[in-house]
Image: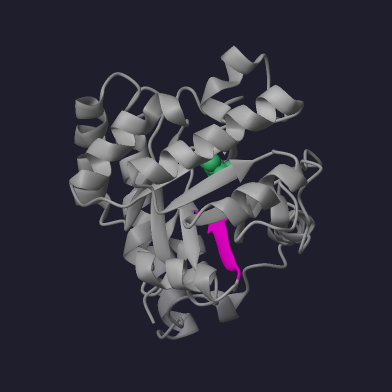
Amino acid sequence: MKCTVKTLLQRKEDHGKVSMLTAYDYTTARLVDSTGVDMILVGDSLGMTMQGYENTIPVSLDEMIVYGRSVARACRDTFVVMDMPFMSYQVSPEQALRSAGRLMKETMADAVKLEGGRNVSPQIRAITQAGIPVCAHIGMTPQSVHAMGGFKVQGKGEDNARRVLRDALAVQEAGAFAVVLECVPPKLAALITKELDIVTIGIGAGPDCDGQVLVYQDMLGMTDGHTPKFVRQFADVGEQMKRAFSEYDEAVKGGIFPTEEHAFVKSDCSPEFYEKLERETGEGRQ
Ligand code: KIV
C-alpha cells in the first residue's frame, strides 16, 4: 500500500518505527520499493555517491530532477522525498517555492527536503502552504560544510543543544511533517522526538528517533572503506561486485565467455554455406 504523510504520522502515534534509504536510480529504487522500506530519499548526497564530488555543494536542481524522475517512476508503495540542492531555496521563500514546485512537477515525488531550522522557516511555510509536504533537516547539515568547518557533530554543549531544539520546534511550527536529525547526541535526539508531533528521522543520532535513514551505498559496503562510524553494514555488495567484474574480465580475456550458447540467434545455415560465403568474399576482394 502507498505510504503517505498520514501513514507516517500515524506510525509515530502508534509508536512504530519508520525506515528510509537513499536511492538515486530506477533499478535501485525498484528493489527498495519491493521491500517494506517506507521512504526513499533522493538525497543530494548523490553529489558524492553518484558524481564523485567531495561534498553536496555542486549539485544542481536540474541534476536532482533527472535522478528523482527515475526513482519516482520505480516506486509504487514507497514515499519519495526529493532533496532541494544548495542555493535552490536559500535566497527567498519565493525561490524555494519555485524550486519545490519544479521538483514535484518534474519528478512526481511525494515531498521535498531542505536543510536548516529557524533560518529557513519562511521557506518551509511558503512550500507547505502551497500543498507540498516538507521534510526538514537539522543538526549536521552537509550544505553548510564550509560554515561548519567540515562535517562536524552538532548540538554538543548546552547552548548548541538548546539551539538544535529551537530549530526542531521552529520547523514543526512552520509546517514540516518530518525532520532529519543528523549527527546530534542521542539524548538530545530522544528529547526532540518526545517533544515533537512530527516524525524525527535519525542518522548518526542514536536509537530513539521515530525513524532512521542511511545512504544505501554505505549500508551495502560499496564505498571502498570510507564508511561513517554510525553506519551498520548490512551486506558486502562492493566485494561481490568487484569479484564478479574481475571474473568477467578473466572469462572474456581467456576466451571462456561468451560461448555459442550465449549467442542471441543460433547459426542456422549449413557449414558448407559459410565456407562458400567466405570463398565468395575472398574472390570479391581480388
Ligand atoms: O543527502 C542525503 O543523502 C541526506 C541524508 C544523509 C540524510 O541528506
Vertical placement of residue 109 versus 165, above or below: below
Ligand 1 falls in which quarter?
top right
Observer-nearest residue: 65 or 89?
89
Q: Is residue 21 magenta?
A: yes
Q: Residue at x 70, y 38 (%)?
A: 184
Determine whether, in the image, residue 205 is placed left or right of residue 216.
right
Nearest the eye: 23 or 21? 21
Question: What residue sits 36% from the left and 22% below the top?
Answer: 87
Percent from the top left, x then y, of residue 169? 48, 41
Q: Is residue 246 left or right of residue 17?
A: right
On the question of residue 213 being in view, the answer is no
Of 38 and 15, the residue lying toward us: 15
On the image, the x and y values in percent for residue 155 come to: 69, 31
Q: At 59% from the left edge and 28% from the top edge, which residue is drawn? A: 163
Residue 71 visible to the viewer = yes
Magenta span contains residue 252: no
Q: Which residues are magenta?
A: 17-23
